[in-house]
Amino acid sequence: MELINNEEKITRALLICVDTGSYDAQASMDELEELVKSAGAEPAFSLTQKLPRAESATYVGTGKLEEIAALCREQDIDLIVADAELSPTQLRNIEAATDVRVIDRTTLILDIFALRARSKEGKLQVELAQLQYLLPRLTGKGIAMSRLGGGIGTRGPGETKMETDRRHIRRRMETLRSELAEVEKHRNMLRRRREKDGVITCAIVGYTNAGKSTLMNTLTDAGVLAQDKLFATLDPTSRALRLPGGGSVMLIDTVGLVRRLPHHLVEAFRSTLEEAAQADVIINLCDASGDEARVHLQVTRDLLDSLGCGDTPVLTVLNKCDLLDSTLLPQEFDGYIQISAKTGEGIDRLLQAIEDNLPVRLHRVRLLLPFAKAGLVSVIRESGTLQSEAYTAEGIAVEAVVDDKLYAKVKEHLV
């Protein structure tokens, strides 16, 4: 159900933030503005207040709250979005003082995820995260029980669950966890099959809107949705990628990251993220044209560390280099792979780097197999990449790509 607009009227949002100095408030507010746009609303105004800590009852100070209420009346504000995770008390008090619906950063991100989810697993994960967030906020009737009644921050199952009791929600959460466990069991089975078949995987991870889907499409013609929006892609996509040496790997596109990603989402999407974490090679893709490149790279590194990827080769790749002068890149970025997924610049270097970091070495070979060893053709077809075969008077002429183990079996027949 589409609830972005109300009677064709674009939702006008006021963004508020308490800057305690614990993080870069301006960068976080810039990101919040992009999140609001991605949800389909118009970020009309933003207000930031410097405080030692957020007010426990109203988030902002009482004077600032009066200023917010006046601005909402004068500027026809439909929605207030706080750049933090608010308590039920803070939500209730701000709504009472302003007579405007209030959502927080977590609700906004959950709403975008509900909008973007396409696969069964994605929808299950989003619903579980929404219910985990909703459960402690069932504080009573009235405005606190109807906050998800219409507009931004209302998509997905949240709006249908608001008037159910805690027992019903907990029961639904158990059902969701069971269904997700079945999906994860199926994914683990597919992963074990890939490992058994010797399929090598390469995962693209990185900040949202870094160009992961565009890179996926450039490398594999995957047809993944690529838009200038945060979280345009939510469900992981896998495609075969051909490497310069003739071998191939399975390339996996993953959900994007943001700073201060709600822990409900990290937990719900952990199985999806672990799919990337267990890849043989990881591409940490970053938008080099943005001012926050260092921060974005660190956000991804921190997540990979938390998932235990210390021994996996990680290629740091700077995307969108067509938008800036590479000589202006910080010196600390020297040695990183510079590409433009849009123009194709640097893609050859990236493919070579992936090949150089594979856990097994691939050999491109030309063989002349005696007819007595024709069975090796079937072995190559199953365990390697058979590029061509031709029957001649001397034997079977074969061109193939094989790994070290298979190479040892066929090297005596090299042409």
Image: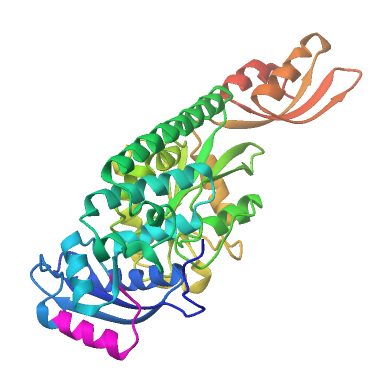
Q: Which residue lies furthest to the top in this view?
A: 372
Image quadrant containing the C terminus: top right
Q: Residue furthest front?
A: 141
The residue drawn where x is 40% and y is 62% is 154
Is residue 80 inside the magenta stretch? yes
Q: Position of residue 326 (x, y in %)?
A: 46, 69
Of residue 3 and residue 412, the one placed in the foreground of this image is 3
Q: Where is residue 402 in the image (x, y as percent from the top left)?
A: 64, 27
Of residue 248 and residue 221, the one placed in the foreground of this image is 221
Q: Quadrant of residue 226?
A: bottom right
Image position of 40 with respect to 393: above or below: below
Q: Residue furthest right?
A: 393
Residue range in magenta is 64-81
Q: In which quarter of the image is residue 334?
A: bottom left
The chief SS type of the magenta part is: helix
Is residue 185 inside the magenta stretch? no
Q: Would residue 87 be seen by someone viewing this image from the given angle?
A: no
Q: Where is residue 309 in the image (x, y as percent from the top left)?
A: 35, 38
Image position of 327 with respect to 263: above or below: below
